[in-house]
Image: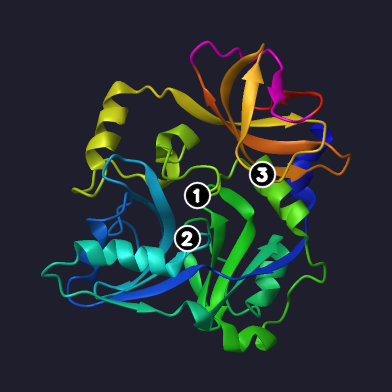
Amino acid sequence: MDNYLNISEKIEGHRWWRPQAVLKVTGEDALTFLQGQVTQDLKLGSSSAVHYGLWLTPKGRVFADSVFFILGPQDVVMVSERTPAALLCSRMEQYIIADDVYIEDITEKFSGLDIYGVGHARRMSSGEKEVPSPGQWVSFEGGFLFHRWPVVSGIFRAIFAREKERLVSGIPEAELSTTITEWDRIARGIPSVPDDVGPGELPNEAGLEAVAISYTKGCYLGQETMARLKSLGQIRRQLVRIQGTGLIPLTRPLSVFQEGKRVGDLKTTAVAPDGGYLGFALITLLAFDRQKPLQIEGVAGEATLVDG
């Protein structure tokens, strides 16, 4: 099964999807308001910077994640792949008191397209400009073209006007299945919010502090917990990748055991080409041995840790 962990380098193709939320936040206080709500420093970087940030609960757990495009101090577009627009709107409206902030739900106007392969992304831009470098975006059919994940290259994401779907050219012929794209996501170590890390988890448990949290910006909801975690430098649980054989039930989460003791929960998984699986598991680190095999609730066979 180890051979399939490097499948990402060989994938070329595309995947259509629909974002759960595309929101336009405007008003005199738009950027300042959002800056006080999310973990990322939205005021850092150039005007073409892509900002990936988290929305936390007051106790520092992960409520949602979003990608932010700062068009101006009074004009911000935010996109969430998995969190519905209604939830994000409700969350923001709770904290708008005397702020000059307006939220417009424009989700239904937009499409999502993931492109695997730099050459394909360059052809999609019609040769008019280079593909964006990691952390940057370029305009694309009434929307944005950028890297799928802040620290991963080779996968590009386009969020653009749905009415322009038929105008998009240069898309690689192969349409990738969810089986392949989910395998690729987990193999690259990209957690899904809220499926792998959500309202019960801290962002640090999934390693998201490296890409989604600023420790130098001003106050935001959940900041005290993040500052305390940074100071202590310790977490009790960790999201790890595991691989194994056997048929995984659709129900989630599934309990993970080691030598008869429950040590965590299996979160998302993807089926391997050889019939095995690769998945994320949230493991309690106390008394957990990384070298010993794991057993998954209701699954025949053992699983092993991919991460060291």
Q: Is residue 252 left or right of residue 198?
A: right
Work out how far the residue at label 1 is from the one at label 3, CA to CA, in angstroms: 15 Å
What type is the residue that disc 3 sits on?
A: Thr
Where the N terminus falls, by quadrant?
top right
Give the residue drawn at x 81%, y 38%. 247
Observer-nearest residue: 279 or 134?
279
The residue at which mark 1 appears reads as 194
Which residue range is magenta in the image?
Answer: 286-299
Kindly tell me whether residue 123 is visible in this rendering: yes
What type is the residue that disc 1 sits on?
A: Pro
What colour scheme was applied to this rendering of the protein?
A: rainbow
Q: Position of residue 277 (x, y in %)?
A: 77, 38
Q: Secondary structure at mark 2?
A: loop
The residue at which mark 3 appears reads as 251
Where the C terminus falls, by quadrant?
top right
| Dominant SS type (magenta) | loop
Q: Position of residue 218 (x, y in %)?
A: 19, 48
Q: Position of residue 236 (x, y in %)?
A: 43, 22
Work out how far the residue at label 2 is from the one at label 3, CA to CA, in angstroms: 20 Å
What type is the residue that disc 2 sits on?
A: Thr
**Rendered view: 220 above or below 33:** above
Q: Secondary structure at mark 3?
A: loop
Observer-nearest residue: 281 or 36?
281
Find out whether residue 117 is within the magenta segment.
no
The residue at which mark 2 appears reads as 83
Say whether marks 2 and 3 touch (CB < 8 Å): no
Q: Earlier in the sequence, mark 1 or mark 3?
A: 1
**Rendered view: 178 above or below 240:** below
Observer-nearest residue: 252 or 287?
252
Say whether marks 1 and 2 touch (CB < 8 Å): yes
